[in-house]
Structures are given as structure tokens and as C-alpha cells.
Image: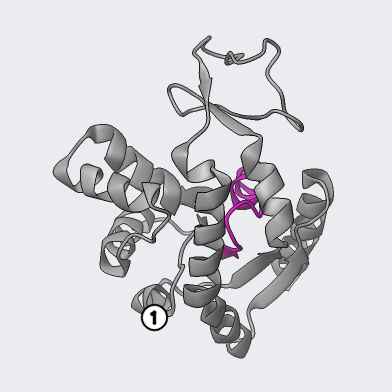
Amino acid sequence: MKIILLGPPGSGKGTVSEKLEKDFNFAHVSAGELLREEVKKGTTLGKDIQKIIEKGNLVPDNLVTELIKLEVTGKKSFILDGFPRTLKQAEATAELNINLVIYLEVPEEIVIERFSGRRVCSTGEHGYHLKYLPPKKEGVCDHDGTKLVQRKDDRPEVIKERFKIYHKETQPLIDYYKQKGILKTVDASPNPEKVYAAVKKVVQELKKK
């Protein structure tokens, strides 16, 4: 099964993907992680990506599309998390033959609250939330003891810009996949457990067919 998770920044795509990966043995392909990995390598491409992300802008379609295609080659079951973000990206990867698109719908004000409390460890591997998922010791990662930091793209002013871009660039995808008859909308406002329960139900129903 090949699934796309659609939703604005902070709708919980990463959390849902990780749980689906565990429960159904899907390969989790995160566009954001692939881009951050490139930044981490410190390549010329990575430095260019970093500048774009920190401004809250979207990375060019052709670049993200090629990264994704390389990552999913040979995989029969996968979840695309945070991709596609534009109609061009969707059309450029139509040959992937996606079975299901889950749209996680959530208001901007809820997302800003989620992001403002989000922290990651200095290695970038472990995530926390000051309100919903705090570390055992304030400001320190439970796993590797490194300092917790707020990513530049988690700041409210950047989130507002990302939301604006999201609705302009990504909204047409909802109509695109709706016309194909593979779109399912899930309310992503409740707590993560309720959201995932709704998503899991959608996936199980499709697997039965």
C-alpha cells in the first residue's frame, strides 16, 4: 500500500507516520527529514536548502521530487510524509500509483501553539514539547543528554508564513486527489491518540478491500 499524508505544518504528519510504520510495517519517507539530512551533510545543496527553509519558503519542486523518487525506488509499501506539497510535485510523481491520501485538517491557531512549545535535541534526532511531551530534565534530551533547542522554522512568525504558503501552494492538491477518489479527511485538532485512531481506521478499511 502506498499512502500520502497531507496537512499543514504541525498537523501531526510525522507522529501519524511513525505509528503507521510500526503497526503496518510501512516505510516512512519524510520529505522534511530528507531535506534536513542534506543540510546536515553541509553540501552546497544543503546550504541552499537551509536558507530556503529558515525563511519559511518551500524548496523547489524538481529538487524535492527527485529526492523522493530516489528514496522510494524498490519499496512496495510506504508513507509519504510532507510530500507532495504542490500540484507540480503530485503530477511529477503520478507513476508512483498512490492508493490513499489522508488529509489531516487543523486550524492555524492550534498549530502555532504546538510549534511554539516544540523542542529538538542538538542532534536533531529526538523531539519534545514543553506542554505535551516534556523531557524528564528541563532543557535536556532524555536520550543523549544534549541541549534542547527551538528550530528557527518553529517560531510563530515563520509558522504564519508557512501556513500562508501552504494554503496557496498545497490546497489544490486536495481537489486533485479528491477527483481521483482516493482522498480521506481526518480532523487533526484532537490529541495525537484520537487522531491516530481515526487514521488507523481509514487504513484498515482500505486494506480490507
Position of residue 200 in the picture relative to residue 25 (left or right): right
Q: Could you say which is closer to the camera, residue 72 or residue 86?
A: 86
Viewer can see residue 1 = no
Residue found farthest to the left: 44
Q: Is residue 57 above or below residue 169?
A: above
Residue at horizontal 38%, vertical 73%? 89
Q: Which residues are magenta?
A: 1-26
Position of residue 88 in the picture relative to residue 167 (left or right): left
Viewer can see residue 65 = yes
Residue found farthest to the front: 157
Residue 107 appears in which quarter of the rendering? bottom right
Q: Position of residue 9 (x, y in %)?
A: 57, 55
Residue 19 sits inside the magenta stretch: yes
Position of residue 136 in the picture relative to residue 92 (left or right): right
Q: Position of residue 141 (x, y in %)?
A: 57, 16
Say what secondary structure mark 1 lies in.
helix
Q: Mark 1: few, some, or many residues within 10 Å (few <14, many ≥20)?
A: few
Type of amino acid under label 1: Glu
Q: Is residue 190 above or below residue 201?
A: above
Q: Could you say which is closer to the camera, residue 120 or residue 108?
A: 108
Q: Position of residue 202 (x, y in %)?
A: 76, 65
Q: Position of residue 181 (x, y in %)?
A: 64, 85
Residue at horizontal 73%, vertical 74%? 209
Q: Is residue 162 above or below residue 15?
A: below
Residue at horizontal 46%, vertical 51%? 29
Q: Quadrant of the N terminus?
A: bottom right
Residue 106 sits inside the magenta stretch: no
Residue at horizontal 53%, vertical 78%? 173
Q: Tell me, what colour scheme is on the image?
A: one colour
Residue matched to label 1: 91
